[in-house]
Image: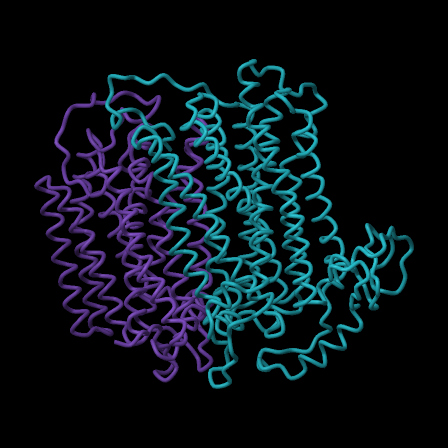
Amino acid sequence: MELTTVWFGLIAVLWIGYFCLEGFDFGVGMLLPVLARDDTERRVMINTVGPVWDGNEVWVLVAGGATFAAFPEWYATLFSGFYLPLLLILLALIVRNLAFEYRGKRDEAAWRARWDLMLIIGSFVPALLWGVAFANIVRGVPINGSKEFTGNLFTLLNPYGLLGGVTTLLLFLTHGAIFLSLKTDGEIRHRAGALAVRIGAVTALVAVVFLVWTQTLTGNAGSAVLFVVAALALVAALLMELRGREGWAFTGTMVTIAAAVAGLFAALFPDVMPSSTSVAFSLTTSNASATQYTLTVMTWVAVIFTPIVLVYQGWTYWVFRKRISTHHIPGGRSGTPPMPQKVTAGR
Amino acid sequence: MDALDLARWQFGIVTVYHFLFVPVTIGLSALVAVCETLWVRRGHDHWLRLTKFFGKLFLINFAIGVATGIVQEFQFGMNWSDYSRFVGDIFGAPLAIEGLVAFFLESTFLGLWIFGWDRLPRKVHAACIWAVHVGTLLSAYFILAANSWMQHPVGYAYNPKTGRAELNDFAAVLFNKVQLVTFPHTVLAAYMTGAAFMLGVALWLQVRTSTPADDRTMYGRATRLSAVVLLVAGLGVAVSGDLQGKVMTEVQPMKMAAAEALYHSEKPASFSIFTIGSLDGSKEKFSVKVPGVLSFLATGSWNGKVEGIDELRARYQKTYGRDPGAKYYATGGYTPVIPVTYWSFRVMIGLGVAGAGLGALVLWRTRRGRLPTGRGWVPVAIAMPFLPLFANSFGWIFTEMGRQPWSVFGLMTTSSAVSPGVSTGEVLTSLVAFTLLYGVLAVVEIGLILRTVRGGSAPTPIDDPTLEPVDRPLVHAY
């Protein structure tokens, strides 16, 4: 297999990792005003992702860096072309990051309320806009012979692109709600589970429309299979959630997101950014790539370090595998006292 | 102002801002790790309290450093797309490796450290903060390798067929001679910055009259530790800076000439402490000069010849008139903005020396267990953190502005690096958005730090032994 194909695949893997992991972080952030009844419950929600959100976010930095290294032309065209949506994503991620770290640093309701709002906005904006961006990449945008994007913000806000955004938004909401039902205990767990099923049903409908639309636009056999897997996994996840099997339900939405993103990349290949102006101007894995030498160096680095990263990130999830409830929050109201319980669905 | 000027302002603002937090992160992670290690080894409660207290300040700083770091990763593609196309084959690799090798390490182990109190054995917990520190060093190494390549491109060849610079020797990029002096200089300066931060905070709390006696002893320990680190790192910064000056004279002679505003070659060349009057080479009204010092800084000999701006400009025009990156090449004066390079170089050195000097003073006044007291120390404590902090900023302003008009020295000018497809309005929008947001965040951050410092270190809470570790309340919960 050619190294350009390998790196196309690796970048797909990085985005899959990002959306699978950061997806539930976004979901938790967006559900903050919906699921929590008071500050202690909000803190329970935030602390379910507390130890891991920052590591999850690094996936997007590495995806960006890997795109720069392996496909410099793709990196240059994409980020200069999708300028304003990317700016909004960056601003949102900045305020979200600080909300996590700063909201608990002062014990005042107004301070916390302000950072809660930042956390909600900072989760909502990227959850929507990453979907808009990816849908547009797959669909194709105006790119001229000098590999420059010639559209503007409104080029990206087409019905298909917006549907892509709504799809990722809903997927992350469902994913986050299921995650919360898996990681919390007490009332909030039941509320999260019930909500997951309701949002999940809507998500399934929207996602199927979006995936079918994608398949008819640019799909191939590979993307068709992956999209079917994504849809089935989502239905299975909701059934499992209904039966209280939260670990399996979470696995289900992980598979859904992974298969859907993989399907989008499959539909894209061998282009990396198709041009809607002329097929001749499309950026492909071969005309956008770095040299064989650079790709070889990067492959060695990836082969050595990716397994190490996966091991210690996996270890973090193992260390923090237990459910969190209100009694874990310092100074918070004591909820149900800790009862000896079977560890369910440790990840 | 056109899109290029705005993009340059944006790069300057977001990068200088980002680098206020980076050196504190590097330096303070090491110092917090030392405190925790001392606690693990000696078991004294003071070290645990110092770990948690400075750990909290570290987290406030780290959060904003990470948040602003995301912009750094993406702005090359956004504002500098022609740069990204031209050098991406070389420049992208260290950025990607930085993410994979360093960012994952930092963020994952920091999460373990924040939430792992009571969940992890002590030694493992202390190892986590060390892992964070190693992550910051790796991050510094790869990003400085990328920057050093812009200062002195090596390990590449220009490919006329693809019209870009292409990597052919990655080891040459990693062990670039500029990198080998820049990395120690930057990291040692970061240790100075972290130490000065800890020193300022600890000294202030120690001389504060409302601090209980036992706590004063505790802050005295932090004062002493950070003063030692500040002084030792300060000496290292001076030595590495001197080495850096000689390499710089070799690879970018114009930058050294611009540091002194030296228009005509001199042998030996003197170094002016300050100058009143214009720096355009025409006339100077008043200047305090030390003979031979510039010769020593540039060449290592008190009598060495230092080339002036006028001679270098002629030489550059001869050399780079037929540059291989001709598509990206625009003729220019080859001269950076002299007042900026002249003053930033001096302010960098002045602030660094002042920081290390105050460190030495504190070290002397705390000898054999003495604890300084009195209001007289308050201004010292308040000034302390800012000295190395701003020395870093001026160092970067000097080295980046001193490279102009080049983006990659000798290969690509800054004006040819900007995104051709991005409109002035778009750059202006992002410039205004980032500047406003960063301004607000600075106010919030400083407020939070001051508040935390004023609160001081909280006594260690008493554990409820009936609870299993996993059922205890989280120590550093969000």
- Expressed as whole percent of the image width and height from the top left, the position of residue B84 reads 49, 69
Q: Nearer the viewer, residue B317 or B237?
A: B237
Left or right of B130, for residue B233:
right
| Colour given to chain A in the rendered image | purple
Q: In screen coordinates, is B331 left or right of A23?
A: right
- In this view, the residue in front, B180 or B51, is B180
Measured along the vertical axis of the image, is residue A192 above or below residue B455? below
The N terminus of chain A, quarter of image: bottom left
Count of picture labels:
0
Q: Quadrant of residue A101?
A: top left
Q: Colour of chain B?
A: cyan
> Could you tell me which residue is drawn at 49 percent across and 43 percent down?
B64
Query: Image quarter for residue B381?
Result: top right
> Residue placed at 84% from the left, 68% from the top?
B264
Residue B424: x and y in percent read 57, 66
Assign the C terminus of chain A to one quadrant of the image.
top left
Q: Is residue A88 left or right of residue A168?
A: right
**Residue located 55% across and 66% down the image:** B149
Relative to A129, residue B169 above or below: below
Q: Nearer the viewer, residue B28 or B278?
A: B28
Q: Position of residue A203 (x, y in %)?
A: 20, 53
Q: Position of residue A87 (x, y in %)?
A: 46, 57
Please determine whether, in this image, residue B449 is positioned above or below residue A246.
above
